[in-house]
Image: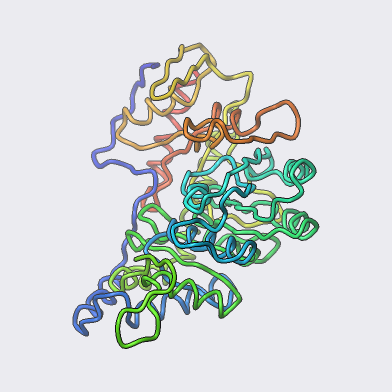
Amino acid sequence: MKTIKGITPFKNKIWLSSPTMHGEELKYMQEAYETNWMSTVGANINEVERITCKTVGVDYAVGLSSGTAALHLAVRLAGERLYGQPKVGHGTLEGKKVFCSDMTFDATVNPVVYEGGEAVFIDSEYETWNMDPETLEKAFESYPDVKLIVLAHLYGTPAKIDKIREIADKYGALIIEDAAESLGATYKGKQTGSFGDYAIISFNGNKIITGSSGGAFLTNDPNDAEKVKKWSTQSREAAAWYQHEELGYNYRMSNVIAGVIRGQYEHLQEHIEQKRTIWDKYRGGLKDLPVSMNPIPDDCEANYWLSCMIIDKNAMAYQVRREKDVSYESEVGKTCPSEILEAIASINAEGRPIWKPMHMQPMYRSNIFIKKDKEDIGADIFDRGLCLPSDNKMTMEQVDTVIGVIRQCFE
């Protein structure tokens, strides 16, 4: 690593994206405590579901323990709608292929496997870093019987969801919209999470607003909302005793966690503006270097959850990533993500590599991966890209310090 000169490490660590509390959260948690609604029912859950519907623009939201839980129930619901209710102990997608975003966190994809399905990965595009509609069309030409698409909006930037919706409708496929990272982002004026047949959001500890955990299932169908709510509470039937006729899960949101989320919602737009300011500061401070920021197309408004950058191909230093470690060589005028991340860590700040594409993960390497042409775009973005410290609480002086570190990496 190039020696970083003249920059004093931060006294307190600068995180990639940590929770930012304001005070209202504690008020609603206290309310849950004082009224003894400490379980999976209560005013906080009801209010979180109401606010979520209003924010995203959907009719129904079901508060759940995590975004992953929401994805699992969305996948199970889609499978049952498409193929019928399975025998107990079997998934709803047994033996069925599902088209999935390739460059994402594995929580987007794992629920397909929970339900016995086979994920088929669709490569990304440079314009949004999300699922490429043209590649999706190519996938349907090869596998026209696929009836489910699981799509993620990466780093808070919407995918070209209208084009993907058009393709899905053409082939009679359902869409599950993973908006875990994109709460508050809009595509052509409409909120992400409102385009899919089903959608989910996440309130994990690093998201734009957080409950420390938690998620929500989104739909416009009251029957689907009721079914997910039932499944999330162990599928208990309306009987005086514990009667169970189908598989259930312990996935319902806690009223205490909902209190945190309820307080956080009051600051959603404030958090988005803070994240936007950080992204703009990085863009301006790095504009004369051979790098570019994660793309924000003109027809959408991101929530700027993470500020990311990608190094120009001709400015990439030699870098080799193995399964769990990496090696690189420092070069004058060039650098690589691993070198920059080490340099950022040396001043007590946290960065992160771009999500490693699913088709490159050891557990999914045997799955089908579909590219538009010869180039593996997701792998290229992973190779040249990185996530920068993007914490709401960062000052502009701290962002400038990180920019100074990145500049030294190119010297």
Is there any visible trace of residue 252 in the rendered image? yes
Q: Quadrant of the N terminus?
A: top left
Instruction: Determine whether, in the image, residue 399 is placed left or right of residue 223.
Output: left
Residue 340 vertical placement versus 42 (above, below): above
Residue 246: x and y, percent? 44, 70
Near-viewer residue (151 or 56) = 151
Residue 67 vertical placement versus 258 (above, below): above
Looking at the image, the residue that sits furthest to the front is: 87
The residue that appears at 64% across and 66% down in the rendered structure is 197
The residue that appears at 70% across and 27% down in the rendered structure is 375
Residue 405: x and y, percent? 41, 28
Is there any visible trace of residue 208 in the rendered image? no
- Quarter of the figure with residue 3: top left
Numbered label tally: 0
Residue 237 vertical placement versus 274 (above, below): below
Residue 269: x and y, percent? 49, 65
Near-viewer residue (168 or 312) = 168
